[in-house]
């Protein structure tokens, strides 16, 4: 019995020691970075994503099972800024995995090199405390997807230099695919340039900027603060004054307040996808924009 246990332990420790030579274990905080990592890493990696695609990435319950995933990870991909600040740092500390701590080769901050929007000149906590370093919802511009992919590629190459050519080739394919699709997406949105919309949460500025929308106001009076009656009155007035056709929201926000505005004004509430996996048909990062653009074009027509 004892011998069997010792042999079993030996096999387990061998498997752990040599895991590097085989599959690279990646943990991504969201489904979007999971999808991009899979497109770059291909069959050299397996990826576990913590947040689901229909979950608010600001608020994720740090489950013990995530800590086990992190403890066994070779790479950790965070979207950074303060998007996951409520749960990512504590999970990292609990994992006790030195390979993936901030500053280690196995830690990838996907935001490096992204031109950030809405960077405040000073941090005022009374203005809502979740976008303090600039707006963190940058993956909703597909051009930023290319920067994310570059960062992930760099991280993979650091820990697996022998696969550099493979990762670089996949990155090239990804970039070309984004360029090609971006042309189709922007063409589809061209006739709606400057279309005024209301958004629930301040998470669409990169998307707005890329596709030429104009967000007039938010259902949330401040980021992270649910709509108040006075905010609803203000929104209804703005929708009527600007003949706004669309209210953009996400799967994780209650529809009740948007429905009030819809009923009062006739504006349509559109539940767009903020992440891969928000809806079953959105399997990868390309699908995310295919889905949102199609829905918007239909509603703005
Ligand atoms: Zn946010």
Image (spheres, helix red, strand yellow):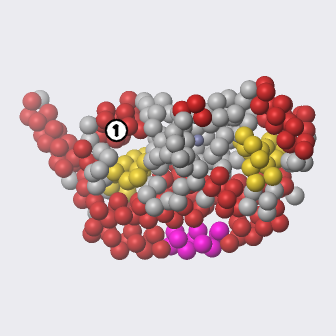
Estimate the x, y position of residue 44 in percent, counting from the top left.
36, 61
Mark 1 packing: few (<14 Cα in 10 Å), some, or many (20+)? some
| 21 vs 241: above or below | below
**Residue sitting farthest toward the top:** 229
Magenta segment: 173-182
- Name the foreground residue: 292 vs 111: 111
- Name the foreground residue: 143 vs 95: 143
* Residue 45 covered by magenta stretch: no
Q: Which residue is mark 1?
A: 92
Estimate the x, y position of residue 229 in percent, counting from the top left.
78, 25
Residue at 29% x, 50% y is: 103
- Name the foreground residue: 46 vs 70: 70
The part of the image, by quadrant, that contains residue 52 is top right
Q: What is the magenta segment's predominant secondary structure? A: helix
Find ligand 1 in the image and state its quadrant.
top right
Quadrant (top left, top right, bottom left, bottom right) of the N terminus? top left
Estimate the x, y position of residue 113 in percent, counting from the top left.
46, 61
- Name the foreground residue: 139 vs 61: 139
Residue at 40% x, 47% y is: 27
**Residue sitting farthest toward the front:** 122
Is disc 1 placed on a helix, strand or loop?
A: helix
Q: Does the numbered disc 1 mark a residue whose Cβ is under 8 Å from ligand 1?
A: no
Residue 116 left/right relative to 242: left
**Residue sitting farthest toward the left:** 3
Residue at 82% x, 34% y is: 234
Residue 233 left/right relative to 71: right
How many marks overall?
1
Estimate the x, y position of residue 209 in percent, counting from the top left.
67, 59
| 278 vs 68: above or below | below
Residue at 11% x, 36% y is: 6
């Amino acid at each position: 019995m004892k011998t069997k246990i010792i042999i079993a332990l030996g096999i387990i420790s061998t498997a752990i020691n040599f895991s590097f030579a085989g599959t690279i274990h990646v943990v991504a905080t969201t489904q979007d970075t999971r999808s991009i990592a899979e497109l770059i890493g291909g069959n050299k990696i397996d990826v576990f994503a913590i947040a689901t695609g229909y979950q608010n990435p600001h608020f994720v319950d740090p489950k013990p099972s995530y800590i086990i995933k992190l403890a066994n990870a070779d790479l950790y991909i965070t979207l950074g800024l303060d998007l996951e600040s409520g749960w990512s740092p504590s999970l990292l500390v609990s994992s006790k995995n030195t390979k993936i701590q901030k500053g280690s080769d196995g830690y990838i901050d996907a935001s490096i090199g992204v031109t950030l929007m809405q960077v405040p000149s000073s941090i005022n906590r009374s203005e809502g405390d979740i976008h303090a370093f600039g707006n963190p919802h940058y993956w909703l511009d597909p051009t930023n997807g290319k920067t994310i992919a570059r960062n992930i590629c760099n991280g993979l190459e650091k820990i697996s230099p022998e696969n550099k050519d493979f990762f670089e080739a996949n990155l090239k394919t990804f970039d070309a695919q984004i360029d090609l699709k971006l042309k189709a997406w922007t063409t589809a949105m061209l006739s709606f340039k400057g279309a005024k919309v209301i958004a629930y949460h301040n998470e669409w500025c990169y998307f707005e900027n890329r596709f030429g929308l104009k967000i007039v106001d938010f259902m949330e009076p401040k980021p992270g603060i649910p709509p108040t009656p006075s905010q609803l009155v203000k929104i209804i007035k703005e929708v009527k004054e600007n003949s706004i056709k669309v209210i953009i929201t996400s799967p994780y926000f209650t529809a009740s307040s948007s429905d009030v505005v819809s009923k009062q004004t006739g504006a349509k509430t559109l539940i767009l996808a903020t992440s891969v996996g928000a809806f079953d048909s959105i399997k990868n990062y390309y699908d995310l924009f295919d889905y949102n653009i199609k829905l918007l074009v239909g509603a703005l027509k």
